[in-house]
Amino acid sequence: MSTMRAVQVVGYHQNPEMREVDVPEVSGPFDVIVRIGGAGVCRTDLHILEGQWADKTGVALPYTIGHENAGWVHAVGSAVTNVREGDKVIVHPHITCGLCRACRTGDDVHCENSQFPGVDTNGGYAEYLRTSARSVVLIDDELEPADVAALADAGLTAYHAAAKAAKRLTPRDTCVVIGAGGLGHIGIQIMKALSPAKLVVVDRNPEALKLALDLGADHGVVAAGNQVEEVLEITRGSGAEVVLDFVGEGGSTSEGIVMTRAAGDYHVVGYGENVNVPTIDLISAEKNVIGNLVGSYNDLCDLMALAARGLVTLHTQKYALDDFQSRDLGSRRRPRARSRDPHPLRARRDELISFLRGNRGERTGRRRECLLTGGGPAILIPGSQQEFG
């Protein structure tokens, strides 16, 4: 059996390590082996290293992280008919059964028998990944795996929330997006593609807001302390029909609820703090608080259709797989994520933290900023370091 390089979690609150592991092989009729062309770096990876997912998954260490993956089909099982060797694909983050009630109704993200490569089984910070025929989506000939890999989770999460929100929005309505970072800048593009509503973006970083306006936002509001008042002024005192909160911490949840008009929808996408709302306020104003996980297989197909038409593009920075813990990696990325609080995970893994892009929270609060200012989700690519010098 041949071997490959893989970035593995060897212990919680420890640096991940590059190890030589066996290349995954086809073991079932619906297996698909993907040669990785790009693996997105997600804030969930940081949470995994901190041990936040340990009790939820019970995964045995060591294992390979990485759940935003795209590449080329390397091998397929005997029953696979939807892809063949050499096809370019993006990989849905879940492996689903197709038989449970959720899968039967197309809500496969809530599959009762799913696996989550990179979270509860081996993922894509490696040269090859084993997944399922139910999880691979063909990508357009004009797109390359490294350019779309982060759409597998960051983009898919943004699409799932935006698509739900767009169903109720009309040309007379307003949608507020809180956070214009790695996840938010994708959400802005999706909302512009799916909805005719006025789009207002709130972010601490003026450069991130400039990008948001370039992507089609109608208003940019700097979160400098009076952002709620500015949003209410834009909406003539009523608030927005929909608020998409890609931050979920640093006070954004309470502010987002206030920005939401009566009978409006407040969508929580980022996470980090509690949503604390008096029940009488929810009842009297009939506001809806809506949680959002990652999207379904069909959501990913729809998202890739938008990407193929050029309506959704990623602002990414690319690094060789070997650079996952290079000490000079942070200095080669622009901009660096500015960490304002000490973190228990030190040494070379600090560089991994430095380019995490906030796929679960844009981190616009005081504790840490990971805002998009011309950068975007970081992509690890198997290959020599010289290719990315």
Image: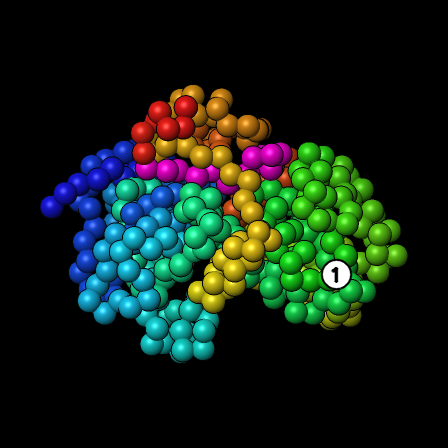
Q: Answer whether residue 32 is magenta in the image.
A: no
Instruction: Using residue 202 as the reference point, say whether residue 247 is left or right of it.
Output: left
The colour scheme applied to this rendered structure is rainbow
Q: Nearer the viewer, residue 279 or 159?
A: 159
Residue drawn where x is 62% and y is 34% of the image: 373
Q: Answer whether residue 368 is magenta in the image.
A: yes
Q: Predominant secondary structure in magenta?
A: loop
Q: Position of residue 350 (x, y in %)?
A: 43, 28
Q: Which residues are magenta?
A: 367-382
Q: Position of residue 87 (x, y in %)?
A: 33, 55
Q: Report the label total.
A: 1
Residue drawn where x is 71% and y is 49% of the image: 216
Residue 328: image quadrant is top left
Q: For residue 258, say whether it is visible.
A: no
Residue 192: image quadrant is bottom right
Q: Nearer the viewer, residue 300 or 82?
A: 82
Q: Looking at numbered disc 1 in the image, what kind of residue is underneath it? A: Ala
Work out whether 214 lies above or below 386: below
Residue drawn where x is 29% and y is 33% of the image: 17
Q: Position of residue 15 (x, y in %)?
A: 34, 32
Which residue is identified by label 1?
197
Q: Position of residue 123 (x, y in %)?
A: 32, 49
Residue drawn where x is 23% and y is 69% of the image: 79
Q: For residue 137, say whether it is visible.
A: yes
Dot 1: what SS?
Answer: loop
Residue at far front of view = 141
Work out whether 324 lies above or below 67: above
